[in-house]
Amino acid sequence: MNGVAVPKYGGSESEQPPTIYTVPSELRSANVEAYLPVAVEIGLVHQRWANPDFELLQDYKWCCVRRLISRHHLLQESSRTRTLLRRCLAALKSLEPRIWASYPRNVNRQDRDLVHTMLLDGCFILHRLLKYARIARREAASSASASATAEGGNDDDEGDDDCSQVFGRCWVWGFVTRDLLLLENQIPFFVVEKLFEQLRTDPNETSEVLVAGALRLFRSLRPQNLHASPITCVNVHHLLHLFYLSVGKPAPAPAPAFDLHQHVQPPSEFTQWVPCARELEEAGVKFRARQDATSFLDMEFHGGVLEIPMLQLYDYSEPLLRNLIAFEQTYPFTPGNVTAYAIFMDCLVASPEDMRLLQLSGVLVNQMNSERDREAARFFGRLCHETYLAADRNYLAGVITELNKYQRARWPRWRAALVRNYFSNPWVTTSVAAAVVLLVLTTLQSFFAAYAYFKPPKQQ
């Protein structure tokens, strides 16, 4: 194994393992539609022109190329425009081995004009990232203008082009944003960076503006507030990876260097899980929505209270979380936190009663149009279909251990049963209090009667 596998991925940068994968069939079988684009195709995985709905935005990609080139105001002659275009094509041509290495070997490489594809898709993504970077700067400069510029696409000289795409499909840009976060709908981020270097108008502007634009573009899809930890372009493989870094728990240390030896032996699966929410409540565990979390993954358990950040479930939540999980299940250098979170929540939500319990505590908010309580209770179960998690990579292992220890203790269970059976409503509480008072009075009466019998008062 070491003699064959290690030399394959132990050489130059272009020989590193892929970063863009196809969704495994065992994951895809649970929900095929969750991994397919509906508005725009990006990259090399999907078969182009398979859907006529893609043709409109495929033509629009050329508009993005022309607009990015036309930003250079000195280009008054068509010959200069062609020179800049050739420079972009030459830069992409030099990256061709590295681009191919970013995709798995099972991607169809026949009849593919790689440079042409990367130019169109890269300029399309670059155009949107720069657009939302400008929106983010204006919002930061003036909060009063945020409502006028946010999400609407009315971006000065770009408004007409963007608005021309919505006729006949008014919400196409929302679908585009979601399509850009599909695992199979990606191009390497270094392609976008290379085009940015060739087409930027300000030589002092760095590629970090691309990260700012992406965070603003995907802001409406976040499961929780994006944390403030810096994300550098050096560590980003593609847009889905960037989004993954922005919503996950901040890494305590830099990602380890590539070492295939660590992945020759498959890790053991994690087998210790927690009871459902109803059983934990019977054991005295209280659920609370955590307010100070920086990620929807950031849970804590202390003093019998399990704090989970609030998660709002929308119609797009399942495809989004599915693609994040698929990224973890295909790329070996992820911590697997989204998978661990989904499996943990699947254990908690085993029935509609568990779902209602977490909704009443403010942990889950069901905003899905077509999901009733019974179907919503299966939300995390669908996400976890054919997913696996390494025993030594579960960030919730400590929380799970403490929950199981607390659930097995007797006193919390007895206390919870007492509260549930005798203090569940005011009338029962009043009856219990009256009974206690009567019991105390009866005890006192019996005591004084017995005391008077054994020690009668002295006669004067």
Image (spheres, rainbow, N blue to C red):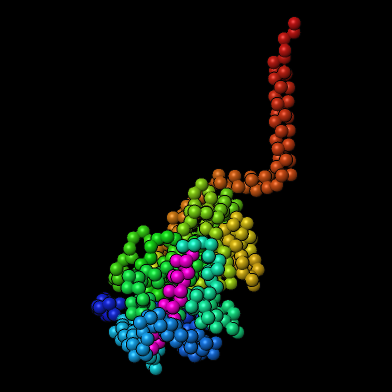
Decide which of 15, 25 is in the foreground and name it.
15
Quarter of the image with the N terminus is: bottom left
Locate residue 82, reporting x and y percent: 35, 89
Of helix, strand and loop, which mostly describes the magenta segment? helix
Q: Is residue 30 visible?
A: no
Give above or below for 330 relative to 440: below
Decide which of 167, 410 is in the foreground and name it.
167
Quarter of the image with the C terminus is: top right
Locate residue 218, reporting x and y percent: 49, 70
Q: State the residue at coordinates (30%, 71%).
A: 258
Q: Is residue 381 left or right of residue 20?
A: right
Per the rendered image, the range of residues in magenta is 114-139
Give above or below for 292 relative to 33: above
Locate residue 303, reporting x and y percent: 51, 47
Q: Is residue 421 magenta?
A: no
How many circles with numbers are drawn on the protein? 0
Locate residue 179, reporting x and y percent: 50, 78
Decide which of 165, 321 is in the foreground and name it.
165
Q: Is residue 287 visible?
A: yes
Kindly indicate the quadrant of the structure image that contains residue 441: top right
Decide which of 338, 77 is in the foreground and name it.
77
Residue placed furthest toward the bottom: 111
Kindly indicate the quadrant of the structure image that contains residue 96: bottom left
Q: Is residue 38 left or right of residue 124?
A: right
Q: Is residue 3 left or right of residue 119?
A: left
Q: Is residue 118 magenta?
A: yes
Q: State the residue at coordinates (29%, 68%).
A: 257
Q: State the residue at coordinates (58%, 78%).
A: 171
Q: State the residue at coordinates (70%, 26%).
A: 444
